[in-house]
Image (tube, rainbow, N blue to C red):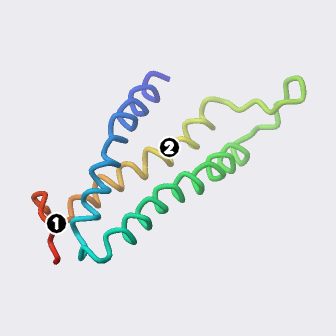
């Protein structure tokens, strides 16, 4: 359980990078497209949440061993580790992919 707390603390701290990501997107395209790309970037972040929520539920359901308590499904700790591992995995993937991005040095790359 302590590992999950540590990992989610790191993810929570790293979530502040969303603001940096919006600035990065704006600086990486011509100014005429800045609003459009910012909207698409924001939509992409929301779609990630939209897709991950049912995916976590699906993994929990696949790992469910059939135990019910007062009519409510009871999942074991391993099921939660597997389900929430997707979030950690995508965070690691994002960290790897950002290394391929070009540094803008707070300057507009395209006019």
Q: Are marks 1 and 2 in contact (CB under 8 Å)?
A: no
Residue at the location (29% across, 52% down)? 95
- State the residue in front, 35 or 95: 35
Instruction: Tell whether 52 sits left or right of 21.
Output: right
| Quadrant housing residue 29 | bottom left
Task: Name the residue tied to disc 1.
Answer: 102
Residue 80 x %, y %: 60, 36
Instruction: Tell whether 8 sits left or right of 100.
Output: right
Instruction: Tell whether 65 sits left or right of 88.
Output: right
Is 2 drawn above or below residue 23 in the view shown?
above
Which class describes the residues within 10 Å of circle 2: few (<14), some (14-19), or many (20+)?
some
Is 19 drawn above or below residue 74 in the view shown?
below
Residue 50 x %, y %: 59, 54
| Quadrant housing residue 6 | top left
Task: Name the residue tied to disc 2.
Answer: 85
Q: Marks 1 and 2, Cα distance to the nearest angstrom?
A: 29 Å
Residue at the location (25% across, 73% down)? 31
Q: Residue 110, labelled with which disc? A: none
Assign a secondary structure to mark 1. Answer: loop
Q: Residue furthest right?
A: 71
Which class describes the residues within 10 Å of circle 1: few (<14), some (14-19), or many (20+)?
few
Marked residue nearer the N-terminal end (1 or 2): 2
Residue at the location (89% across, 29% down)? 71
Say which of marks 1 and 2 sits in front.
1
Residue 111 x %, y %: 16, 78
Instruction: Tell whether 59 sits left or right of 10.
Output: right
Is 40 drawn above or below residue 2 in the view shown?
below
Residue 27 x %, y %: 21, 65
- State the residue in front, 91 or 61: 91
Residue at the location (67% across, 30% down)? 76
Assign a secondary structure to mark 2. Answer: helix
């Amino acid at each position: 359980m302590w590992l999950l707390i540590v990992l989610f603390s790191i993810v929570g701290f790293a979530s502040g990078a969303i603001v940096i990501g919006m600035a990065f997107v704006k600086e990486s395209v011509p100014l005429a497209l800045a609003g459009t790309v910012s909207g698409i970037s924001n939509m992409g972040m929301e779609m990630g949440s939209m897709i991950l929520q049912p995916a976590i539920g699906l993994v929990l359901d696949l790992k469910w061993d059939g135990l019910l308590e007062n009519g409510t499904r009871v999942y074991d700790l391993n099921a939660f580790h597997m389900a929430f591992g997707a979030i950690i995995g995508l965070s690691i993937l994002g960290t790897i992919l950002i290394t391929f991005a070009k540094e803008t040095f707070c300057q507009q790359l395209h006019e």
